[in-house]
Image (cartoon, rainbow, N blue to C red):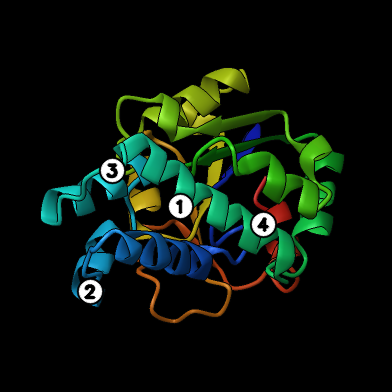
Amino acid sequence: MTNKKAIIFDMDGVLIDSEKYWKQAEYEVFTSLGVKVTDEYSKITKSMTTAEVTQFWHDKYPWKNKDAAVVEQMVISRVIELIETENCQINGVKSFIEKLKTRKYKIGLATNSPSRIIPVVLKKLDILHLFDSILSAEFEKKGKPDPAVYYRAAEKLSAKPEDCIVIEDSYTGMLAAKNAGMTVVAFTNGNKEIDCKIADYKMDSFENNEIELLKMN
C-alpha cells in the first residue's frame, strides 16, 4: 500500500459508538407515530440514510399530520441529544488521527449520517480541527453503498480514489469505498459479527493496531 495520501473515516461505529442511539431514537419517534418497529425491518433500515429510513417506515405504516421531513429531524434531534449526554467515544480515535496528521495524511470524513450531527460528534471528541474535509451523503443523490460520497471526498482532498484509505465498520460502507476504487480497512471495535470479507485489512482497535496502519505507507 504505497503512496497513499488520504485517509477517510466513516463516522457511526468508527469515530463514535452511536449506532445504538440511532436504533433508540428511531424506535421512540416512529412508534410514537403508530409504526410497529420490528427487528426484521430494522436490519433492513440499518444502512440507510435518515431520509430513506423515514420514507421506509412511512411506506409501511403511513402516519398523518406530520411531514416526513419533520419526522426525520425529530429522529436526528433525539440522536444528537443522546450523543451529547452519553459516553460513546471510541477509545484511541484522537491520538490515532493525530499520528496520521504527523505523517502528512489528509484526513476526511464521509458518512451517511445527516450533516447536523457531524459537528456534534467531532466537537465531543475534540477532533473537528483534525479534518481537512467533512461530507454527508445527504447531499448526494444516493447514500452508501453508492460510491458518490467517497468520490466527492477524494475530490475535496485533492487525492485520486486509488490513493485513499477508507476506515469503515459496515459492509455497506466498505462496498461504497470498494466501488470507488479505494483501499478498505474494516474497523471492528471487537465486534466479531462485522462482515469483513471485502476489506483489504482488518483493524480491531485504534489503540492496538495504529502502528500497523501507520506502516502501510
Q: CA distance from mark 1 to mark 3?
A: 12 Å
Residue picked out by circle 1: 75
Sort mark 1 into few (<14), some (14-19) or many (20+) by Cα contacts within 10 Å: many
Q: Measuring from the top left, give residue 125's x and y in whole percent.
A: 78, 54
Tag in front: 1 or 3: 1
Tag in front: 4 or 3: 3
Determine whether the residue tagged by mark 3 lies in a helix, strand or loop.
helix
Q: As shown in the figure, which amino acid type bears the numbered disc 2?
A: Thr
Lower position in the chain sequence, tag 4 or tag 3: 3
Q: CA distance from mark 4 to mark 3?
A: 34 Å
Residue picked out by circle 4: 213
Quadrant placement of the C terminus: top right
Tag in front: 4 or 1: 1
Q: CA distance from mark 2 to mark 3?
A: 17 Å
Sort mark 4 into few (<14), some (14-19) or many (20+) by Cα contacts within 10 Å: some
Lower position in the chain sequence, tag 1 or tag 3: 3
